[in-house]
Image: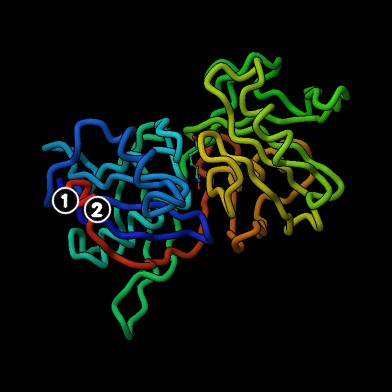
């Protein structure tokens, strides 16, 4: 089956986007994600995102399904959903400055497009990411607290045990945020996979270390569930802001720097939506045709 795709990224968090608006989608997108996201034997990316037409009568303009590089399906993708909005506008499926996209984990989200008047292309997107989910059983985690705040969590490797303090938050997908003095000094390649599969997280977890430089400036690094080290994680940046507010480390609005670039985050009030603003970029288009291998 030949599939048209677009390679896009949000501050270096790169996915392969396949539209179901005008072509049939394979029955097993998980298996396709593993093959197409492979950086040596495929197109290469942090995973696969399907952009699908909405169900009849739906309030949404489109449906997003995201698959990590290991084929697991995630409930949400913050960098991905900005690219979905750009894809829908630039390719003509939805020609409106406000787009609504249905996600598996966070429901229907609204996105406002910043359109470059010269090229009529989307450059940046502001997303109402929904309210953070703070009930431990819904994150899900067995750590105590709603949400668990700065809770001790230990990892053991090379015969040594290190205890971090972590805050758990869901943005439609689970996150563990650990505030540290210096994000560059953390061996995320080692602790990331151990914490991703820590027994306290039955669905695994996205792992972030964050450093607060000022109440409105932070930096972070990410180990993503199902994809490993990535250059950025949009839902993770939301989780860092929420964890920063709840633990008194950050203001309600902050710029968060990730290895691939910066995102602007705001959480105006408890119980309400987090707002994320950042770029969306198209890299190239192609056709994935496994029958030609
Ligand atoms: N990169 C994403 C998050 C992708 C999903 C995640 N790995 C999961 O399994 O929950 C983002 O930008 O939010």
As displayed, is residue 273 above or below residue 232? above
Please identify the quadrant where the N terminus is shown.
Answer: top left
Return the disc, 2 or 1, that comes first in the chain's sequence: 1
Can residue 268 be seen in this snapshot? no
Secondary structure beneath label 1: strand
Locate residue 219 relative to residue 80 in the image: left or right. right
Distance Cα–Cα, label 2 vs label 1: 6 Å
Locate residue 180 relative to residue 85 in the image: left or right. right
Can residue 14 be seen in this snapshot? yes
Task: Provide the residue designation for mark 2.
Answer: 288
Give neighbour class at mark 1: few <14, some 14-19, many 20+ (Cα, 10 Å). Answer: few
Q: Do the residues labelled 2 and 1 touch (CB within 8 Å)?
A: yes
Residue 239's spot in the image, x, y percent?
61, 40
Residue 184's label in the rendered image is: none
Residue 68 appears in which quarter of the rendering? top left
For the point 38% across and 57% down, the residue is 83
Task: Provide the residue designation for mark 1.
Answer: 2
Secondary structure beneath label 2: strand
């Amino acid at each position: 089956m030949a599939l048209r795709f677009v390679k896009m990224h949000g501050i270096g968090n790169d996915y392969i986007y396949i539209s179901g608006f005008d072509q049939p989608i394979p029955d097993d997108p998980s298996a396709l994600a593993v093959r197409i996201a492979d950086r040596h034997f495929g197109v290469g990316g942090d995973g696969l995102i399907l952009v699908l037409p909405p169900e009849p009568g739906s309030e949404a303009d489109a449906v997003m399904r995201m698959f990590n590089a290991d084929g697991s399906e995630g409930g949400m993708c913050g960098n991905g959903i900005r690219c979905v909005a750009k894809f829908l506008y630039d390719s003509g499926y939805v020609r409106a400055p406000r787009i609504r996209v249905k996600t598996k984990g966070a429901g229907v989200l609204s996105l406002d497009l910043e359109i470059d008047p010269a090229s009529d292309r989307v450059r940046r997107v502001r997303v109402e990411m929904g309210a953070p989910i703070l009930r431990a059983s819904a994150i899900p985690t067995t750590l105590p607290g709603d949400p668990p705040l700065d809770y001790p969590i230990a990892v053991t490797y090379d015969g040594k045990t290190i205890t971090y303090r972590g805050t758990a938050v869901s943005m439609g997908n689970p996150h563990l945020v650990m505030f540290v003095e210096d994000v560059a000094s953390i061996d995320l390649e080692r602790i990331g996979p151990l914490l991703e599969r820590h027994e306290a997280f039955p669905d695994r977890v996205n792992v972030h270390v964050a450093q607060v430089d000022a109440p409105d400036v932070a930096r972070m690094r990410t180990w993503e569930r199902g994809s490993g080290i990535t250059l950025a994680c949009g839902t993770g940046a939301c989780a860092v802001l929420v964890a920063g507010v709840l633990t008194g480390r950050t203001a309600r609005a902050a710029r968060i720097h990730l290895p691939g670039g910066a995102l602007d985050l705001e959480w105006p009030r408890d119980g309400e939506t987090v707002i994320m603003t950042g770029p969306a970029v198209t890299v190239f288009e192609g056709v994935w045709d496994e029958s030609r291998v």
